Every structure is written in C-alpha cells, then in structure tokens.
Image (cartoon, rainbow, N blue to C red):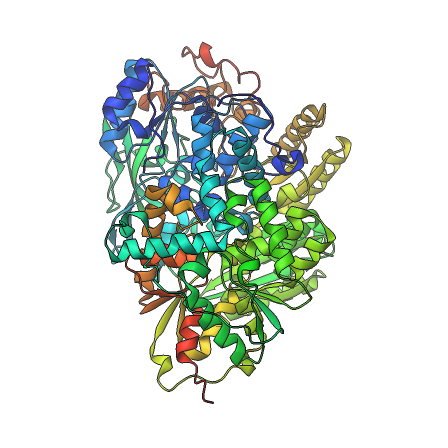
Amino acid sequence: MRLRRTTGTDPLVEDLCRVLPAERVRAAPLERSIMGRDSSIFEGGQAGPVCFPISTEEVQGCVDAARRHGRAVVPRGAGTGLAGGAVPLDEPVVVVTTKMNRLVSLDADQRVAWVQPGMINLDLSRAVAAHGLHFAPDPSSQQVCSLGGNVGTNAGGPHCLAHGVTSAHVLAVEVVLMSGESVVLGDADGFAPGLDLRGAYVGSEGMMGITTAVAVRLTPNPPAVQTILLAFDTVDAAAQTVSAVIADGIVPAAIEMMDRNIIWAVENFVGAGFPTDAAAVVIVEVDGLPGGVEAEADRVGELAIERGGRVRRAADDQERALLWKGRKSAFGAIAQIKPNYYLHDTVVPRTRLAEVMNRVYEIVDEHDLQVMNVFHAGDGNLHPLLLYDRREPGIMARVHAAGSAIIEASLAAGGVLSGEHGIGIEKRDFMQLMFSEADLDAQSRLRRAFDPDEMANPGKVLPTGASCADVNALEKVPEGVWG
Amino acid sequence: MSARASLGIDPEELASCVACGLCLPHCPTFRVTGEEWASPRGRISAMRQVQDQGAAIDQAFLSSMDTCVQCRGCEPACPSGVPFGSMMEATQAELARRRRVDWRQWGFRVLGHPWLLNLFSRGLAVGQRLRLVPSRRLGLPKIPLRQHRLRVSGDDVWLFTGCVMDAWQRSTHAAVKRVVEAAGAGVALPGAAAGCCGALSLHAGLEGHSRALAVRTMRALEGSAPILVDSAGCGAVLKEYGKHLGTPAAVAFSKRVMDVHEWLAARADRLPSALEGGQDLTIAVHDPCHLRHVQRAHQPVTEVLTPFATVVALDDDGLCCGAGGAYAAMQPELAAAIRERKLEAIRRSGADIVASANPGCTIHLANAGVAVRHPLEIVDEMVDYDH
C-alpha cells in the first residue's frame, strides 16, 4: 500500500531502494522519529531508514545493504515492547515486519503452523479457531503484538502458567543472520538434532538476527473453562490465597492479581463489575475436562473464602471475555490517572509475594510516587507500574530511584530481573545486579557466535563492559533517550 | 507549507496517550499498511513532535494526518479514553487555516445549498444516463432523475434529511418515514431550511463553515420533538453540536438527537409484524463507524432488524469499511484496501444482503458489488403494513 513516495540522496537509502520498492523504504525525519519509540518508557531513540520487507529475500537484501554501509539493524514488529527492545539507537536500519503477516501453512493434525513474524498473536488464534486450536502464549497485548516480537522476548501471558511461555510453543525459527544468510533453527517436526540453537535464539531480543518465519505449536482448546473472580480486603489475603491454590495441587490455566488503584481504572474502562472497594482482586481460570474443572473451581472458591475472600464465577463466555478484557487493558488504562508509567517485571518466589508487594508500597511512599500492581501472581511475576507525569520537574530522578529499589528488593527476596518483557534498554544496566562478569561474558560470547560484529540490535540486554568487544559507540544510553 | 506552530490541540489531551499500542489493530489504515505513522499512536506521536517539539509541518506529517479516515475506531479501543477525534479535528482545522487554496471548500459549500445540490445532482443523473459521467471511477451511485416529494405527517418527531442523502437517496428517507409512521409517530421535515449537517466540513478542518451549518440546522429543527437521523455520520455530528458550539442551546439540541434505530428499538412492540417468509433472508449488519464508535449506538440496528430476518454480525470487530465521508474520494487506494478486508468479513458471514445505516458506507460497499441496503429499507419491505 503506497502512502507516499520517499526520494532520498542518502547512499544507504538508495541501496535499500534497489532491494525494496521505494515506497517501502521511508526516511523522512518525522517517520524516523515516530519509529524512535515503542511502548516502553524510552523516548527519543533515532531510527535510520525504515524498511518494510515482505519476504525473507527482501530482509536479506536489507541486512546486506546495512552491512555494506556499516550500519546496525533493528527488527521491529508492532512496537509494543515494554523494555525498549525495538528502540533504535544511533540511526540503525529499522526492519519492520508488519507487512509479513501471513499464515504460511497449517497442519491441523500435527497442530503446527508456519507463520510470518508480523502476524498478530491474536490473529493466529483466530485463524486456527475453526480447527479447535489456539496459540497458548497470550501476552496482554495479544490483540496487537506480533509473533516475531513474542519470539524475541520469549513472551509470557496469563495463560502461560500451565502451558509455558513462548519458547515451549516454538518448534523452529527461520532467521536472517547479519551475514545475510538465512538459516532454520530447530525443526517443525520436533526432531532437531544437535544443540538446541532454537532455544538459544528464543528470547534473544533481536540480537542474533531477524526472525522471518516461525513454526509454532498450537494447543487444543480446552473442553471446559471456569473463570473465577476473587476479591479481598487485603493484599496479604490475596497473595496467601494464590499460594494456597498452588499448594493444594491445582495448576490453574491462569492466576492474575490486580490491586486497588488499577481495579478502579480498569473498571472505569470495561465495566465488567470488578469490585472497586477491594484491596486486591485475583482472577483464577481453570480448564480441562468438565468434571475436574467443576471440582477445581469449587476448591479455589473454598480456599478464597477461608481467607476472607468474596467469590464470583463468570456465568458465560461473554462475562469471561469482559473480565479478561479488563485485565489485558490495564497498562493502557493508566493515562486515566497519569500520562506516563515505568513498568517493572521482576519475578519473586510465590511464597514471598505479599512481603515483596508490601515492600513495593513502602518504596513508592518513600519516593512520594503512586504505584499500581497488575501481574501474573501464579508464577510470582510482579508488574509494579510507577505512575508519573514527565512534565513534572525532577520526577524522573524519583521514578528511577524507586525503580532501582524495587528491583533490589525483588532480587534480595530471591527473585529475578525480568519475567517476560525482556531486558531491552530498560533493564540492561541492572544485569550486573543479577549476573557475574563471567555470566555476562558467556552470554555475550553466545550472542557473538550468531552475530560476531554485534550489528543486530546493538546496545540492548548486555551492559557495556560485559565483553571485550568494541562497543564504544554504545557506551551508554544516549542523552535524551530517557523520557 | 512549512512552519513551526502549535496545532491548537489541548495539551492535556495530547499528553494523555501512554503509547501502549492497543489502538493499532482497531485502526483501518494501520491494518492495511502496517505503518506506524498510519496508526493512532503514530499520528499522536507526529502531533506531539509538531506541537511540543517544534517539528516542521511537512509532507510526511500531512500524509500521516490526511490518511486518517476519522472513523474513531481507536477511541472505544483506548483504555485511557484518549479523545483522538477531537485532536484530529483540531489538527485538521489548523492545517485548513494554513492552506491558502482549498478546493474542498467549494465542494462542501455546495452541500449547504440544497437547491444547488439538487440542480447539480439532476445534471449528474442526466450525465450518467448519457454515459458522460464515469460513475464507477468516481465511486458514484446511480442518482435518480426525479425526486419524489416527502410530505409532513405530523410533529411528534423530526426526520433530519441532510444533503447528499436527500439528493441521491431520498427513497431511503421515504422508507424510514413509513416505518416511523407505522410505529405511531407523525413526522416533521425540515425541507430546504436545513441542509448539510457540517460533518464533512468539520472533518476537513473547515471550522467556520461547519459552525455556520450547525447554526442553520439547529434553527431549522426547532421545538422539543426528538430529532431522528437515518445517517450515522450526520447523527454523530448532530450529537456533538453541544461539544463543538459549546452553547446551552446546542447542548439542548444535541440531547434531542437520536439515531432512528435507537428510537425504534425503544418502540419495537409498536411496529407491525413481518410478512410471511421474511425470516428466509440472512442479513449481515455492517456497523458504520460513527454509529458504533462515536454514537456507540449500533446495537439497536440489530434489535430492529431481528424480528424481520436472520441477522448475523460481522467478525471484524467493527473495523471501518473505508468510506469515511469524503475519504473514499480523497484516498481511493487506501479506501479500497480497507474495503477489501470488509468484503472478506462479509463473505465469511454468508449473508445474502448487508444492512448499513450510513449512506457513505452504502455507496462505498455497493461500488464493490455488495448488495447493501439501509436497515429500514429492509424493514419497510418486510413489514406487513396491513396489520
């Protein structure tokens, strides 16, 4: 689809225009700066030429052109990443995969599909729904995020508690390396010999190459589902119930928690009947065979009532969909309160959820900020959102200080830096809190096995100084990138 | 046209987007291009760069703004309630002020003069019969040679007749009027006293012109009777007069405005029953954007149609069809690409016929060979007036 022709005298742009039609190479200053950000806190990244390839060969052509001009390459899908993984630093060639959005092939019997990286996560589930199948990883942004990005961040989602995150659902990936070569990692039939390079690639945040096709494993739709909304007067009671459910031997399809402030904002948007007087709500979904689902749903209700909870079951698919719509639109609802948020993604042991959450509340009080929590309670994956208005003088220093304190508190409780959003730029400089020099060097060497010159999405994930490679150009996040 | 200036957007509105991207799949131009500057989030980013950071208003900016259909499908999708339509209207008004020559002004001025529009339309109709007008390429429907006169039947409700719809699709008004009368109301008509509601001018940023049309429309539809509208695009703007003009009279006027299906759905029991055999027809309801996203009153169409036929919903989340008032004429390539997605959804539905409560959508879809009617034209044919 042509919106406007770009004519440029930049030799790199000219080279790219030999590979792609000119209308799919865009380099106007406004277009490059619009591509300067994703859904994360970072503003002011600066893209070089923006390319919209439609085939693996065209991606190879873009990579070759970038290499000839000594320019890095940043892959981008829908641009809904929360850690700045797609934010371009130092004017790289941005390769956008949104026009590569087809379902290439489907083997419903084997429950395997090959898809292009720009296909939207929910579109895949819709496309295979007639076969009684779906793609299990369901990030909250699933209606917009693309599968290439899901692979890049090894994305999770509410329903990954029982089914596992993206890596468990990717059989093979076709990757264009920075040499311009196209390789397939893994095997769509599930019989890949040798080292699991597919496993190394999933979650590599665009630092090993560009995904041009994905073989995904599809999951049969469960025969029965029950969705239960639990409301509690204290966060502690909610957290204890989450632990009690798992300790009871139940593995729900999803356990999600939201605290008071976010309940209000979400309810204001969806009107699903979330109790705005509760300190916390927990959404529990159990699925499987009808008899088992009934028994588990009853047991979840009992465990909640024992801890002072109120219980409501979704009566039908419509009510269930509305509850999930509320949960999945939570981040976007923030601007009802403040125009900006800084989101963390730490994971803590489930048994210490309440303790860490209380510490989070203390930290934001100390820094005079507001926080909202909406997260995957079942696997202890916290998502504290620090709310702020970037126009307020001096606010960023407080936001960063509180963010660091939250990360330190999570790690001190035996947690990890990121559950599912990725490290990107945002958590890059916290990596040293989690990993030793030797750990980081090993990661850097693994990355360079795929991308020796570090031209694929440079400046992300690994802190500088993590390896002896020449990364002088990216010693620090450029001025102004922090919003 | 390259200068640094504010776009006149309310700074609080402009700050209210957190860039989560949940709007992207609900934007028809993003859906067909995959390009960020053709999405609500990208357009807001562009507006911020011009208004907050002093970026130039250049070709890339104009393209990003002018490719917007202004369907406002992004608004109900936004968890933070970002008022995108209002920001786009402010931007278009500023862009219109900067254009020294704007041929659209002349086109839209005709809409304000029913006699001129009628004269022009009859000329066009004759031209079509003589094959002098390339209707298909221009996206024009077959315009009738003669206009049947609509007669006032009472003063219980007003029927807003508008401009192009009255000149080209008066038979639809006639059908709507019969159905409303069958539900027991006498219908008053503004005749030539009202014309265009001002929607096209407003979306093109021609603020002065749209205000003048609003004032004239309010004057023509006086009193306290409900104002029924059978064109979703007009109804949306009439309901927003209060917001745009900001006067108590305009606020009171907007409160009287109802989409005709809203009014009928509340009186469904008063409608006569269906003729035998009516249920054999399967109808897909196409929700016009300005009924679904702006008025948020698309459900009554299905309610009104249900007793008369088998009604199926389209499975595309109410994505725009690409008509967008004058959009199909201004951005024909994009409008056709957007329509292609809608045609696929219509095919999947297996319906015999499509019901659309907006004349622009009707014309745009009919041009692609779809059998499309106004919902109340279908009801008019199905209703057993003798009972």
Above or below: residue A371 compared with residue B174 = above
Q: Residue at x 43, y 75 (%)?
A: B379
Visible residue check, residue A129: yes
Q: Residue at x 32, y 57 (%)?
A: B125
Visible residue check, residue B295: no
Q: Position of residue B298 (x, y in %)?
A: 51, 63
Q: Position of residue B197 (x, y in %)?
A: 55, 53
In the image shown, does B289 or B378 lie closer to the viewer? B378
Instruction: Give the image quarter of residue B333.
Output: top left
Instruction: Give the image quarter of residue A62.
Output: top left
Q: Position of residue A6 (x, y in %)?
A: 34, 24
> Quick one: which residue is furthest to the bottom in this view?
B387
In the image shown, does A145 or B43 lie closer to the viewer? B43
Q: Residue at x 27, y 18 (%)?
A: A15
In the image shown, does B376 or B144 lie closer to the viewer? B144
For the image, the number of numbered tags is: 0
Q: Position of residue A234 (x, y in %)?
A: 73, 53
In the image shown, does A239 or B20 lie closer to the viewer? B20
Above or below: residue A36 compared with residue B253 = above
